[in-house]
């Protein structure tokens, strides 16, 4: 099936506009895929594509490692374990990746994101080279594989090319980490510039763009932090894993006398363009510094629960001036509604209070904060936004009876009935308009990763994707 036509106008039965639900919202879509005009309280017009239920800005996934999806439901045996034992299993998956396998797996994962309501993703990418650390014969082979996967799935990809030079403070990369590395900060900057130039030639920047990441303060020596702070182009977003585990803080304090956040500040890297991922274990001074910088903090609440990381101080960070975005990270689930809810639930468990993040705050974290962290246009219904939408069925087992403005506390990805990217309907009822059922793709990718013959998995019969958009007669 080819890419669906871009609709010229939508009429939403109800929609989330300016932080509240309005009825009868009509959008006109520009040829670029942005919203040209928007009005509320109006009837549908002839030819409008009708979106029943409640339509929200699509979700923006601010932190992903696509290949971690292969570990879902596979790391829960064996009794006790920790983040660090999980990491060994993750390295096993990383070792098995080839550009071909990664393209297959990432296509399935990105399709899962699209049908669940995410229309952009910041992919924190560090599997750059062959397992022994040598370069692939084709330049940027792994990065091109991810870009092709994003194009196939129709998701907007910000490929955060990651600098990963050390296995710890004063420790070289381990054998399992060799393929993540570069020869030093200067070599990484050079590869990043080359990748950026190549992608600018090959891809529409609305679809695929390049950003930068530092794996962590463990992964980049201080001399390279300085170099990167001076030389990284100012227009690139910069992400980093920060204080996910107490052990990282302890090692950083021992090696540098500073916490990870304050080490970044020392090297001029704690600025507004920084997105700090996790920020689970912070001191009061860290919170103040991240807030004063106006940095974004990417919380990944379902991952942080799955990996036993802890509950980060999201509300304290927001009160200090930081912006909160959301990511699915290792993809224990891929569901913007569950991430929104887990952010608020974490706050409730931590504080003993309800309503720390209002539904409007949760939607902002799941949409515009995530695209800002990618240097992208926000999704939504306001003029000038990307016409990236997710429509929710308010009459399902989960949502029936909910007030439309409180669906963030009751809906799941299973209740998303339609997903629009740039004015095109890319998913309906869990099926991708071009790729079909993402579950079948995921089963085939898992079998291929496991080294089994790649054949379509047995799946439940599914309703075919409707050929034509639902139009108002
Ligand atoms: Zn991560």
Image (cartoon, rainbow, N blue to C red):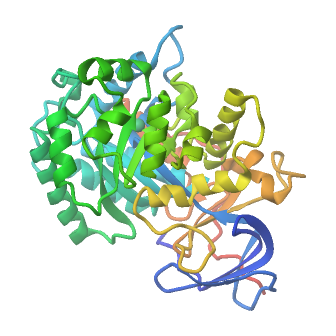
Quadrant position of residue 115: bottom right
Q: Nearer the viewer, residue 60 or 51?
A: 60
Instruction: Answer whether residue 274 is visible to the viewer in this image.
Output: yes
Q: Nearer the viewer, residue 420 or 301?
A: 301
Question: 32 or 358: which is nearer to us?
Answer: 358
* Ligand 1 quadrant assignment: top left
| 302 with respect to 258 (left or right) | right
Quarter holding the C terminus is bottom right
Q: Position of residue 49 (x, y in %)?
A: 68, 80
Q: Residue at x 47, y 50 (%)?
A: 62
Residue at 44% from the left image edge and 29% from the top image edge: 244
247 lies left or right of 187: right
Looking at the picture, how far across and down is residue 19, in whole percent?
71, 64
Q: Is residue 118 above or below residue 314?
A: below
Check the image and report above or below for 235 versus 250.
below
- Residue in front for this viewpoint, 207 or 409: 409
Instruction: Place residue 176 in its image quadrant.
Output: top left
Which residue extends farthest top?
79
As drawn, is 470 to the left or to the right of 180?
right
In the rendered image, the vertical position of residue 148 relative to residue 222, given as above or below:
below
Which residue is the extreme one toward the right?
401
Q: Position of residue 338 (x, y in %)?
A: 65, 42
Furthest-bottom residue in this view: 46
């Amino acid at each position: 099936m080819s890419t669906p036509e871009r609709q010229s106008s939508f009429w939403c039965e109800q929609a989330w506009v300016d932080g509240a639900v309005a009825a009868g919202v009509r959008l006109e879509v520009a040829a670029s895929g942005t919203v040209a005009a928007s009005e509320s309280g109006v009837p549908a017009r002839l030819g409008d594509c009708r979106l029943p239920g409640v339509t929200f800005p699509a979700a923006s996934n601010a932190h992903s490692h696509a290949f971690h999806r292969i570990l879902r439901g596979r790391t829960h045996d064996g009794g006790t374990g920790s983040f660090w034992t999980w990491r060994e299993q993750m390295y096993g998956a990383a070792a098995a990746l080839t550009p071909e396998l990664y393209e297959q797996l990432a296509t399935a994962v990105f399709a899962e994101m699209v049908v669940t309501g995410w229309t952009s993703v910041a992919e924190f990418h560090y599997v750059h080279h062959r397992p022994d650390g040598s370069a692939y014969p084709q330049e940027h082979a792994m990065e091109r594989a991810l870009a092709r996967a994003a194009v196939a799935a129709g998701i907007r990809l910000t490929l955060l090319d990651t600098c990963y030079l050390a296995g710890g403070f004063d420790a070289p990369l381990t054998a399992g980490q060799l393929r993540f590395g570069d020869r030093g900060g200067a070599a990484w900057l050079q590869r990043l510039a080359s990748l950026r130039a190549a992608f600018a030639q090959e891809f529409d920047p609305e679809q695929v763009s390049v950003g930068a990441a530092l794996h962590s303060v463990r992964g980049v020596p201080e001399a390279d932090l300085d170099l990167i702070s001076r030389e990284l182009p100012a227009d690139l977003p910069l992400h980093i894993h920060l204080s996910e585990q107490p052990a990282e803080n302890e090692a950083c304090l021992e090696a540098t006398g500073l916490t990870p956040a304050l080490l970044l500040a020392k090297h001029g890297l704690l600025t507004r363009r920084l997105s700090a991922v996790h920020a689970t274990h912070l001191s009061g001074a860290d919170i103040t510094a991240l807030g004063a910088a106006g940095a974004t903090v990417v919380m990944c609440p379902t991952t942080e629960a799955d990996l036993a990381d802890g509950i980060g101080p999201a509300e304290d960070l927001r009160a200090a001036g930081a912006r909160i975005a959301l990511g699915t990270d290792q993809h224990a689930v891929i569901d913007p509604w569950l991430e929104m809810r887990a952010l608020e639930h974490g706050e409730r468990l931590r504080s003993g209070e309800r309503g720390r993040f209002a539904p409007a705050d949760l939607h902002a974290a799941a949409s515009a904060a995530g695209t800002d962290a990618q240097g992208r246009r926000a999704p939504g219904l306001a003029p000038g936004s990307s016409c990236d939408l997710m429509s929710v069925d308010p009459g399902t087992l989960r949502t029936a009876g909910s007030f439309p403005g409180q669906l963030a506390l009751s809906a799941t990805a299973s209740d998303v009935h339609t997903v629009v990217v740039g004015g095109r309907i890319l998913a309906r009822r869990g099926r991708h308009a071009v790729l079909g059922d993402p579950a079948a793709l995921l089963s085939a990718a898992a079998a291929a990763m496991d080294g089994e013959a790649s054949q379509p998995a047995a799946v439940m019969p599914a309703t075919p994707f409707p050929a034509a958009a639902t139009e108002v007669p």
